[in-house]
Amino acid sequence: QVTLVESGGGFVQPGRRLRLSCTASQSLYFMAWYRQAPGKQRELVASITEALSPYYAPSMVNRFTISRVNSRKSVYLSIEHPEPDDTAVYYCAADSQRITPPQMPTFWGQGTQVTVSS
């Protein structure tokens, strides 16, 4: 059983960089961040493979940075200039193979709330 544990969420002021972390119980090839805002569908933010090849959803380019440290089985997401519209629950997800939308990864964390407000 794979477990993913996110941390780093909370309240943040607009424009203040925020970094989320996720640690897996085992190494997995594909790791990603999704988010779900109130009343909206869950959407992909970014993904990264074990080879450190990142992918960003088109609307997320230049606004988020994904990274990972394989030796720590961890993936990170920086929200560079948070805006109120970035308020959402952010989920860490992972799979043993590359996942391409609309496919969804197999393993999910519980999510961490990010609220952007002044």
Image (cartoon, rainbow, N blue to C red):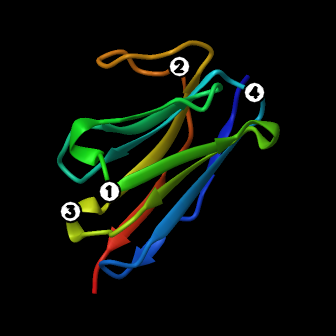
User: Label for residue 27?
Assistant: 4
Q: Disc 3 or disc 1, which is closer to the eye?
A: 1
Q: Disc 2 or disc 1, which is closer to the eye?
A: 1
Q: What is the three-letter code of the residue carrying label 3?
A: Asp
Q: Position of residue 50 (x, y in %)?
A: 65, 26
Residue that label 2 marks: 106
Quadrant for residue 80, please give it. Answer: bottom left
Q: Secondary structure at mark 1?
A: loop
- Camera-side residue: 66 or 10? 66
User: Label for residue 63?
Assistant: 1
Sequence-wise, the earlier of marks 3 and 1 is 1
Quadrant for residue 116, please give it. Answer: bottom left
User: Label for residue 85?
Assistant: 3
Outermost residue on the bottom side: it is 118
Quadrant for the N terminus, please.
top right
3 in relation to 116, above or below? above
The Cα atoms of the two marked residues, 2 and 1, are separated by: 26 Å
